[in-house]
């Protein structure tokens, strides 16, 4: 995503040291762990760090088609922060949690080149929507 758009890619710890309010858009994402994004990302979004007005959410998950549920906790926090969500995406990630490990897990080999290409295109759409909006203002 960073390569495709030229955007900065930061870990949560790095992002804590940056005033993200200076940016127009932030993408918030991680793997899904027990039905929501990584707790460190949820804490970061919740703890009132300065964030842009617009965000997109992304993740990898064993069951990506359930992303409406997996993104719920982060979506709630972001909306509580009065931020606008401009898009969401979830890609398959190899999942060997619990009993899944007994048969090699699900989504083995993911995210693959095809998933990464979809993520690149999604990130470009997010960036382009921002430019389109700023051109009309
Ligand atoms: C402890 C644990 C819990 C997980 N819980 C879920 C889950 O609730 N739903 C899901 O679809 N995938 C779940 N997964 C699969 C991960 O979301 C998937 O492997 C993801 O790609 C991990 O991101 P990472 O590669 O950045 O660590 C879980 C994986 C682990 C290790």
Image: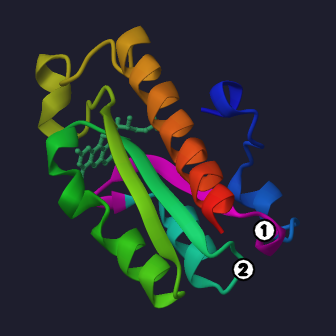
Q: Report the side of 67 relative to 82 (left or right).
A: left
Query: Which numbered disc flags the more N-terminal residue, 1 or 2?
Result: 1
* Label 2 within 8 A of ligand 1 by Cβ: no
Rendered-image quadrant of the C terminus: bottom right
Mark 1 and mark 2 in contact? Answer it, CB < 8 Å. yes
Secondary structure beneath disc 2? loop
- Membership of 32 in magenta stretch: yes
Q: Report the side of 128 relative to 77 (left or right).
A: right
Relative image position of residue 114 (x, y in whole percent): 36, 13
Q: Quadrant of residue 43?
A: bottom right
Q: Give the distance between the C-alpha atoms of the residues marked 1 and 2, in whole angstroms.
A: 8 Å
Residue 19, compared with residue 114, is above or below; it is below
Residue 87, compared with residue 137, is above or below; it is above
Residue at the location (33% across, 61% down)? 36
Q: Which residue is mark 1?
A: 20
Relative image position of residue 26 (x, y in whole percent): 63, 59
The residue closer to the viewer here, 9 or 125, is 125
Relative image position of residue 97 (x, y in whole percent): 25, 38
Q: Which residue is mark 2?
A: 49
Residue density around tag 1, few if under 14, some if 14–19, many if 20 or more, within 10 Å: some
Residue at the location (88% across, 66% down)? 17
Residue density around tag 2, few if under 14, some if 14–19, many if 20 or more, within 10 Å: some
- Nearer the camera: disc 1 or disc 2: 1
Secondary structure beneath disc 1? helix
Q: Which residues are magenta?
A: 20-36
Residue at the location (58% across, 60% down)? 133
Relative image position of residue 109 (x, y in whole percent): 33, 12
Residue 72, compared with residue 111, is above or below; it is below
């Amino acid at each position: 995503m960073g390569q495709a758009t030229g955007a900065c890619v930061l870990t949560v710890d790095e992002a804590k040291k940056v005033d993200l309010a200076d940016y127009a858009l932030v993408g918030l994402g991680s793997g899904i762990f027990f039905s929501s994004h990584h707790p460190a990302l949820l804490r970061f979004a919740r703890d009132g760090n300065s964030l842009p007005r617009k965000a997109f959410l992304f993740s990898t998950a064993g069951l990506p088609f359930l992303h409406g549920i997996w993104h719920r906790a982060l979506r709630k926090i972001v909306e509580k922060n009065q931020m606008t969500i401009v898009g969401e995406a979830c890609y398959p990630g190899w999942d060997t949690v619990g009993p899944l490990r007994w048969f090699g897990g699900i989504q083995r080999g993911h995210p693959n080149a095809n998933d990464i290409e979809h993520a690149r295109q999604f990130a470009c759409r997010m960036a382009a929507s921002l430019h389109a909006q700023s051109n009309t203002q």
